[in-house]
Amino acid sequence: MLKIIKKIFGRAAGEQSVKGKIGLPDVNGKVDRSMLEGALDFLISLEPDPESPDAIELYDLNREKYKSEVVKANKIIRLYGEQIEPKTLEHMQEKFYEIVNSSKYQQSSLHSSVVYSSLSYGWNGIGAWQR
């Protein structure tokens, strides 16, 4: 466990990519696509190398270390979903796949998986959207 803690609070695989991406805005109003992408990019940056033997522990420690930023990122994702009009399932699915299938998030299966699950979870219960 000490090895894992040193990785997270030292120079862990996940920390190098997270560094510099902290500081998501506090949002109470309109969320644009660039804000949504910033939140998704931040959540992607928390992911350690999936081949790491300590990947699960590293992920949990990253999420704990950046807990307030994770909350902000999830709020941005939720607010973006709430702004989609009309809130029909078909229209929301169109927006969902427009984001998930964008070239930016097709760089790796990890990126597309994080985006897919973050949007699906964040939009749950908005309009006709169900996970």
Image: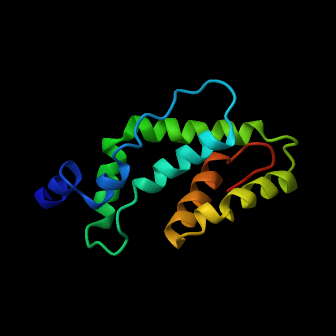
- At horizontal 13% and vertical 60% (from top left) the residue drawn is 3
- At horizontal 34% and vertical 75% (from top left) the residue drawn is 51
Q: Quadrant of residue 103?
A: bottom right
Residue furthest bottom in the image: 51
Q: Position of residue 19 (x, y in %)?
A: 33, 46
Is 58 left or right of 50, judged from the image as shown?
A: left
> Quick one: quadrant of the N terminus?
bottom left
**Foreground of the two, 93 or 42:** 42
> Quick one: quadrant of the C terminus?
bottom right
- Where 91 sits versus 32, above or below? below
- Where 61 sits versus 86, above or below? below
Q: Position of residue 78 (x, y in %)?
A: 64, 40
- Where 43 sits versus 69, above or below? below
Q: Position of residue 117 (x, y in %)?
A: 58, 58
Q: Position of residue 91 (x, y in %)?
A: 85, 52
**Foreground of the two, 34 or 95:** 34
Which colour assignment does the render follow?
A: rainbow
